[in-house]
Amino acid sequence: MEAFSYVAAATGLTGEEAKAAQAASSAGFAYGLAAIGPGIGIGYLVGKSVEAMARQPEAAGMVRTTMFLGIAFTEALALIGFVVFILIGL
């Protein structure tokens, strides 16, 4: 994040403005990294659910329900990460 201080200086931000901008960009960058895990998890979950539904069509309803619960829990992790990084940035 050292490079951001050069960008902030070039745009005319000084003092508290530069610190706030750096904190916001750092929080955004950290959340971007934190969103990779749930993204991979949801992709894997949906892929395996489609595979299970293709192998046993009679169990598609139960697999779909379980898939949506898994997606909700995995997405909750991403939202918790979002809140944590916003709180850290402030």
Image: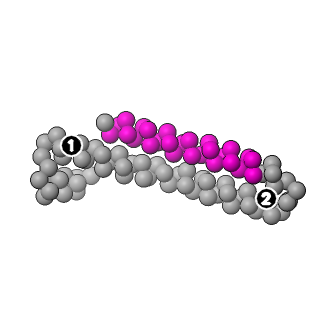
Frontmost residue, 45 versus 12: 12
Q: Earlier in the sequence, mark 2 or mark 1?
A: 1
Outermost residue to the right: 58
Q: Which residues are magenta?
A: 64-89
From the viewer's perspective, tell me whether residue 72 is left or right of residue 37. Answer: right
Q: CA distance from mark 2 to mark 1?
A: 50 Å
What residue is drawn where x is 48% and y is 51%?
35
- What x and y, as percent, mark residue 42? 61, 54
Identity, as a three-letter code, of the amino acid under mark 2: Ala
Q: Which residue is mark 2?
A: 52
Which element type, helix, strand or loop, lies under badge 2? helix
Q: Main secondary structure of the magenta part?
A: helix
Quarter containing the C terminus: top left
Which element type, helix, strand or loop, lies under badge 1? helix
- What x and y, as percent, mark residue 46? 67, 57
Is 14 inside the magenta-drawn segment? Answer: no
Q: Which residue is mark 1?
A: 19
* Crowd rating for badge 2 (residues with CA inside 10 Å; few <14, some 14–19, many 20+): some
Is 84 inside the magenta-drawn segment? Answer: yes
Q: Is residue 37 above or below residue 82?
A: below
* Crowd rating for badge 1 (residues with CA inside 10 Å; few <14, some 14–19, many 20+): some
Identity, as a three-letter code, of the amino acid under mark 1: Lys
What residue is drawn where x is 76% and y is 62%?
51
From the viewer's perspective, tell me whether residue 17 is left or right of residue 78. Answer: left
- What x and y, as percent, mark residue 56? 85, 59
What residue is drawn where x is 59% and y is 46%?
74
